[in-house]
Amino acid sequence: MEDINHQSVLLVVKLSRPGNRRKVNPGLVQVDADSEAIHVAKDLLDSEELQAVQRFDGSIRRYVYARCLPCSVLKDGIFRLPNSLIDEVDGHLGALATGRVELVGAFLSVYPERVEAARARLRGLFDQGDYPDTEMLRAAFGFEWKYVTFDLPSAGVLSSAVYRREQEKANAAIQSEVEEIRMALRKSFAELIDHATARLAPAPGGKKMVFRDSLIQNLEEFFGYFAQRNIVGDSDLASLVDRARAVLQGVTPEDLRTNDFVRNRVQAAMQEIKQAMSDNLMLAPSRRFFVEPAITAPAPEAAHA
């Protein structure tokens, strides 16, 4: 297996936006309880425009997850991006950045109105200090990304003993990351198969369970990028992915809704793949490699994607 450092780069993604919540002094809220045990917060703005930015940020994260790989040896917000996907991802992130600027502009254009609405809605809990001016608020929205590589200093910089020690540590870290990537891919695939198996099975009483088109779309997206993301060369998983791809070849969500024969065939095949994973693939608990940032303050708040 080729060194994953030669097959990928590190992608650093940083998203930030102003928060929409502030803590409130529990003493200002009348409840029959110890104020020390009460935690109260207020929403600063009721703004569909701000919610649109938040939803868009979620789509950015989902895009990155579907194409990148975990890299927990460093920190959140840093991903492994296969070399073969760099141009595609970079171009799409640029398009997403343009779309985000437009959404932020739409929010800022109505911001003064939303502040006045908050004044009326919050009444005694309204604090003008919670609301920066428009330009300060604009600066709180950020979206940037960059590419980095990771390597040891040359043997000429470090003494031979130190270089050997650090090389051993780096090799151990890479091996740990290889296993993390392997488990992350296996877990992602297993979750998709589990979901498909469950939703296509008959509900109690024999009724069909409802499912969204994303049941198929998410699997097809996984299939489409698996070969490029499989930089650890997991041939066992690749075999099962090929089986699942063949099962769904030419099958549409509407086929699964209207054609009982197709639905039952696909469900049975997915159940077999699920069993094969259980029998043959180790699925160790895997650390989530993307944590939704808490948005809790109106000041600029950095959150790694």
Image (cartoon, rainbow, N blue to C red):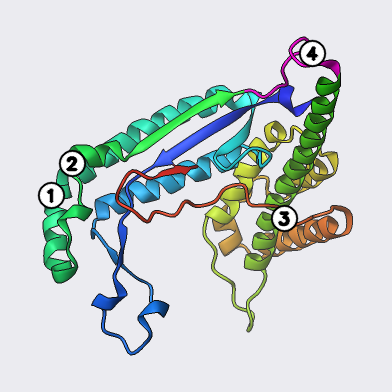
- Furthest residue in direction bottom, as rendered: 32
x 67%, y 57%: residue: 191
Q: Are marks 3 and 2 in contact (CB under 8 Å)?
A: no
Mark 1 or mark 3: which is in front? 1
Mark 2 or mark 4: which is in front? 4
x 20%, y 46%: residue: 132
Q: Which mark is residue 134?
A: 2
Mark 3 or mark 4: which is in front? 4
Label 1 element class: helix
Label 4 element class: loop
**Would you name the residue on which mark 3 appears?**
190
**Would you name the residue on which mark 4 appears?**
155
Kind of residue at disc 1? Pro
Q: Which residues are magenta?
A: 149-160
**Would you name the residue on which mark 1 appears?**
112
Query: Is residue 292 visible to the viewer in this orientation of the structure?
Result: yes
The x, y position of residue 300, in whole percent, is 33, 43
The x, y position of residue 298, in whole percent, is 29, 51
Kind of residue at disc 3? Ala
Label 2 element class: helix
Q: Are marks 1 and 2 in contact (CB under 8 Å)?
A: yes
